[in-house]
Image (cartoon, rainbow, N blue to C red):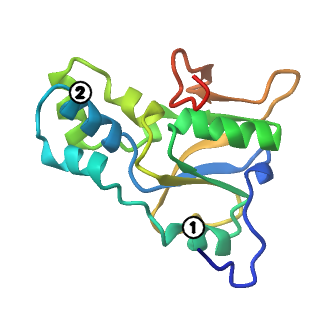
Amino acid sequence: LGNLDGREPVLRSGARPGHVVAMSGRLGYAAAGLSVLSRGFRSPRRLVEAHRRPLPPYDSGPLAATARATSMIDVSDGLVADLAHVAHSSDVVINLESALLPIGDSLVDAAAAFTLDPLSWVLTGGEDHALVATFPLDVVVPAGFVVVGSVLDRGDGDAQVLVDGRPYEGVTGHDHFR
């Protein structure tokens, strides 16, 4: 199914305080497409197609590994939910900055039509299969990646994901055991 080309695998357990969190691909489009379809609509077509046929950034994984990514995960269950796996495996806190998360016009328009906040699709929608990785500060984040947060020491608290410095309230994404 793949080849590491002699590189060590990039695991969920390598995030360290001081690293940056960066993503490649798009988030929220498949979830928005599902919302559109579940209400009986077929447009915006871009969102519907994102739900039906995701476009994972396959080339970004090897780029991130070559650029010394310390941890990596694909976002299939929701950004907050999947980054929680990284936070727990690495025993850290991950802080996402909502102002840094790319939110396309299609998401904004669809959310307005449904009186929703498009950020909720970006944070909790899965099935876009974007990649999220952590990188040391001295690494140039590879092309196609956007910095969206940072890795913090968990101190005396629990390993978790924060959004703008606060725990995310509500469902964080798909839970396979619900």
Give the class, few, some or many, for how many residues have Cα within 10 Å of label 2's Cα (few <14, many ≥20): some
State the SS at label 2.
helix
Marks 1 and 2 sit apart, C-alpha to C-alpha, by 30 Å
Residue drawn at the location 54% of the way across and 26% of the way down = 172
Residue 85 place in picture, x, y as percent? 69, 39
Q: Which amino acid does label 2 sit on?
A: Ala
Q: Quadrant of the N terminus?
A: bottom right
Left or right of residue 147, residue 110 in this image: left
- Of the image marks 1 and 2, the number of the one nearer the N terminus: 1
Residue 56 place in picture, x, y as percent? 42, 60
Residue 86 place in picture, x, y as percent? 71, 43
Residue drawn at the location 69% of the way across and 78% of the way down = 4
**Mark number, residue 12:** none
Q: In which quarter of the image is residue 17?
A: top right
Residue drawn at the location 79% of the way across and 48% of the way down = 16
Mark 2 lies on residue: 111
* Relative height, residue 57 to residue 75 (above, below): below
**Mark number, residue 61:** 1
Question: Between residues 128 and 63, which one lies in front from this camera angle?
Answer: 128
Residue drawn at the location 40% of the way across and 27% of the way down = 120
Q: How many labels does the image show?
A: 2
Question: Between residues 80 and 144, which one lies in front from this camera angle?
Answer: 80
Q: What residue type is labelled 1?
A: Gly
Give the class, few, some or many, for how many residues have Cα within 10 Å of label 1's Cα (few <14, many ≥20): many
